[in-house]
C-alpha cells in the first residue's frame, strides 16, 4: 500500500487525500516523523481537513513533541468546530486534555 501511494505521489498526483493516506500508512509503521510531514502537507493543501489535523497532532505527540501537538490540536479543534465536525472536535479535545495534563 505504501509503495502504491508513493508511486502516485511521484507521478504528480499530490493532493490532501493522498497526503493523509501517506500519513496514515507511516503512522501504522511507527514512522511518526514522516507521518507528521505528510499530515502537515495535507492540512496545508486543505486547511479544513479535520481528520488530517487529528492525525498530525497524534503523529507529533508520538514523537514527544507535546507543545507542538497541543497547538495542532487547538487549530484542528477550531477547524472541526467551524466545519461542524463534532466527533473530530471531541476526539481532539480529549487528546489535547491528556497532553495539557502531561505538560503541567
Image (tube, helix red, strand yellow):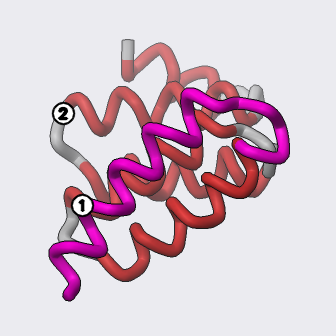
| C-alpha gap between disc 2 and disc 1 | 23 Å
Whether residue 61 is visible: yes
Check disc 1: other Cα within 10 Å, few if <14, some if 14-19, many if 20+: few
Q: Position of residue 65 (x, y in %)?
A: 28, 75
The residue carrying mark 1 is 98
In the rendered image, which quarter contains the N terminus?
top left
Task: Please name whichever residue, 84 or 18, is drawn nearer the observer in this view of the structure.
Answer: 84
Sequence order check, earlier mark of 2 and 1: 2
The stretch of residues the image draws in magenta is 81-104
Residue at 70% in and 30% down = 85
Tally of numbered tags: 2
Q: On screen, 45 above or below 6? A: below
Q: Position of residue 79 (x, y in %)?
A: 75, 51
Determine which of the numbered discs, if any, sits on residue 29 in the image: 2
Which element type, helix, strand or loop, lies under badge 2?
loop
- Marks 2, 1: nearer the viewer: 1
Task: Please name whichever residue, 3 or 64, is drawn nearer the observer in this view of the structure.
Answer: 64
Q: Main secondary structure of the magenta part?
A: helix
Quarter location, residue 75:
bottom right
Q: Is residue 41 magenta?
A: no
Q: Are marks 2 and 1 in contact (CB under 8 Å)?
A: no
Check disc 2: other Cα within 10 Å, few if <14, some if 14-19, many if 20+: few
Q: Position of residue 59 (x, y in %)?
A: 33, 53
Residue at 76% in and 27% down = 13
In the rendered image, which quarter contains the C terminus?
bottom left
Amino acid at each position: 500500500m505504501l509503495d502504491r501511494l508513493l508511486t502516485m505521489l511521484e507521478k504528480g498526483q499530490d493532493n490532501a487525500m493522498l497526503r493523509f493516506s501517506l500519513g496514515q500508512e507511516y503512522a501504522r509503521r511507527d514512522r511518526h516523523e514522516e507521518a507528521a510531514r505528510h499530515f502537515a502537507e495535507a492540512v496545508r493543501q486543505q486547511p479544513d481537513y479535520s481528520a488530517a489535523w487529528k492525525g498530525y497532532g497524534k503523529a507529533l505527540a508520538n514523537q514527544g513533541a507535546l507543545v507542538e501537538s497541543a497547538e495542532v490540536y487547538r487549530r484542528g479543534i477550531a477547524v472541526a468546530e467551524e466545519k461542524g465536525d463534532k466527533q473530530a472536535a471531541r476526539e481532539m479535545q480529549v487528546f489535547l486534555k491528556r497532553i495539557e495534563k502531561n505538560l503541567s
